[in-house]
């Protein structure tokens, strides 16, 4: 198998050399493939004449060689089955054939098979989906657009019920496991559907996937999970398609997939994510019945580690910080928030100020700390002392707020707040000093940047006091 580098996200996959011996990969469709971390295992499927098989092969990309899987103890021949990799076993289940059993568990380290129990298993079906959660296999759908499924533990060799499922089942769909949820997309309900669903086994609940930007509705696509994206490609719309899409479950959004240099259109193919590429192999040209032994490898080129909607390879200058990406407000923080040329370089909020003269370049109502609030006037009204003052000459924003403090001592070592974060420069103090005593007042303006000054003492130092309250 040779990867030929082309100027696009797709690479041509040529299996001619690897298939030169009879033990190589024979043309088939409706087969399965899994990636173990070092080898790809392909098993089962049907030939151009519809004959099902229970043969399989293991491909090692490090040595570019194939080796046969043992037929001893293998499940009965089938196509349209499912396969998952558990970390040590390939688990085969379901499918269609002349006479099939539940499936089997294949151990590549010993090249041996073990049977799967049928006790508690869902009804056998073909063209369903299956995912591995890390501890169990979840199978769902398939058959006559079923909406049922089950959960299988290969260590204990036991089945559990799947619980509540969507009202509408489907067949010829595709599914992946994200690490916490099963994502299902496409397939046939009545017509083909572009609708997808997300299943959370922890709560046994389902939720819909976004449809905006999704690929065209289709049956029999192939898919893979990259660690952050759900890749979908190929299948049948009104005819064969060589298009696809990439779904980001964190943002519930679809991204396009390039068609440049994509493999020949096909359905019923298999594919795996091998850590850097989405490798597809085989499949069927349904209009002619031809089985394919060629494939392709797709490099997503999209890693959005901080889930801010911008990928590192496209323009995100800090893919570890979701607040930094193209289009983000340029804040006065010494960082290039918008990934444009320069740091703190734009008037992002349109208030007429920018760094370093704007304390918050993402808030148009503030730009600097307000100056001193002056001209305090006091008056007595009944049992209250009324105070008012002039707004600061430099408010630092559109709507400064105010604090007023009172104390019996000029040092303000002990104080009380008679106004806290008020919009009007005034207070009403219920404490009126008795004859022969003094009550001192200080005022200051504040905004989202900071609290302004309380004034200067006679010794030239600035007065300080905690923010009210």
Image: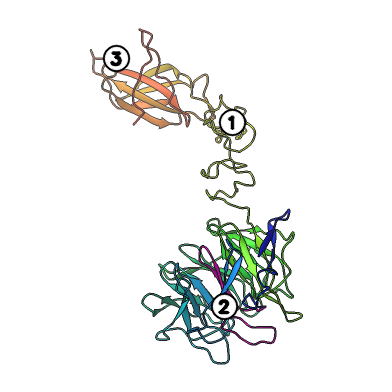
Q: Which secondary structure lies at badge 3?
A: loop
Answer whether residue 239 is magenta in the image: no
Give the residue pinned by disc 2: 56
Give the residue pinned by disc 1: 343
Give the residue pinned by disc 3: 410
Q: Closer to the camera, 316 or 82? A: 82
Residue for point 59% across, 60% down: 247
Residue 116 at x, y percent in the picture: 43, 82
Question: Which image quadrant is residue 295 in?
Answer: bottom right
Q: Closer to the camera, 432 or 287? A: 287
Magenta stretch prevailing secondary structure: loop
Residue 109 at x, y percent in the picture: 46, 71
Q: From the viewer's perspective, tell me whether residue 418 is left or right of residue 191.
A: left
Q: For the magenta stretch, what is the residue range?
A: 27-56
Tell which residue pokes out farthest to the right in this image: 288
Q: Closer to the camera, 420 or 280? A: 280
Mark 1 and mark 2 lie on one chain; the one further toward the N terminus is: 2
**Residue 379 seen anywhere in this rendered image of the structure:** yes
Tell which residue pokes out farthest to the top in this image: 459
Residue 47 at x, y percent in the picture: 66, 83
Which colour assignment does the render follow? rainbow
Q: Which secondary structure lies at badge 2?
A: strand
Instruction: Look at discs 1 and 3 and give the one toward the viewer.
Output: 1
């Amino acid at each position: 198998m040779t990867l030929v580098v082309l100027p696009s996200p797709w690479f041509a996959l040529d299996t001619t050399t690897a298939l030169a011996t009879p033990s190589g990969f024979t043309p088939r469709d409706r087969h399965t493939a899994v990636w173990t971390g070092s080898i790809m295992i392909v098993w089962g499927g049907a030939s151009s004449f519809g004959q099902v098989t229970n043969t399989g092969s293991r491909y090692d990309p490090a040595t570019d060689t194939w080796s046969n899987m043992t037929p001893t103890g293998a499940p009965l021949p089938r196509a349209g089955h499912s396969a998952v990799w558990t970390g040590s076993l390939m688990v085969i289940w379901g499918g269609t054939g002349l006479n099939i059993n539940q499936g089997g568990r294949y151990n590549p380290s010993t090249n041996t098979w073990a049977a799967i129990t049928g006790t508690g298993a869902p009804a056998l079906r073909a063209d369903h989906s299956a995912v591995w959660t890390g501890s169990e296999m979840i199978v769902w759908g398939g058959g006559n657009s079923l909406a049922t499924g089950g959960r299988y533990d290969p260590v204990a060799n036991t089945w559990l019920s799947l619980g509540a499922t969507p009202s509408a089942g489907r067949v010829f769909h595709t599914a992946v496991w994200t690490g916490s949820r099963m994502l299902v997309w496409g397939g046939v309900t009545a017509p083909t559907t572009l609708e997808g669903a997300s299943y959370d086994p922890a709560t046994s609940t389902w939720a819909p996937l976004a449809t905006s930007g999704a690929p065209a509705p289709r049956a029999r696509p192939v898919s893979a999970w990259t660690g952050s994206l759900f890749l979908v490609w190929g299948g049948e719309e009104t005819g064969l398609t060589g298009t696809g899409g990439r779904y980001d479950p964190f943002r519930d959004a679809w991204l396009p997939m390039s068609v440049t240099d994509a493999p020949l259109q096909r359905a019923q193919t298999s594919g795996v994510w091998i850590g850097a590429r989405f490798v597809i192999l085989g499949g069927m040209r349904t209009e002619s019945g031809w089985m394919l032994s060629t494939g392709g490898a797709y490099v997503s080129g999209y890693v959005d580690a901080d889930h801010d909607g911008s990928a590192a390879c496209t323009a995100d200058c800090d893919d570890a910080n979701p607040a930094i990406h193209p289009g983000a407000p340029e804040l006065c923080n010494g960082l290039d928030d918008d990934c444009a040329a320069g740091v703190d370089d734009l008037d992002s909020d349109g208030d007429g100020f920018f760094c370093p003269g704007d304390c918050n370049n993402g808030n148009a109502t503030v730009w600097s700390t307000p100056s001193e609030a002056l001209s305090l006037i006091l008056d007595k009204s009944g049992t209250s002392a009324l105070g008012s003052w002039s707004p600061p000459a430099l408010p630092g924003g559109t709507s400064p707020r105010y604090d007023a403090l009172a104390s019996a001592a000029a040092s303000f070592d002990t104080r009380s707040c008679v106004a806290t974060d008020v919009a009007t420069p005034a207070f009403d103090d219920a404490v009126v000093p008795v004859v022969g005593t003094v009550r001192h007042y200080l005022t200051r303006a504040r905004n989202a940047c900071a609290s302004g000054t309380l004034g200067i003492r006679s010794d030239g130092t600035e007065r300080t006091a905690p923010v009210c309250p």
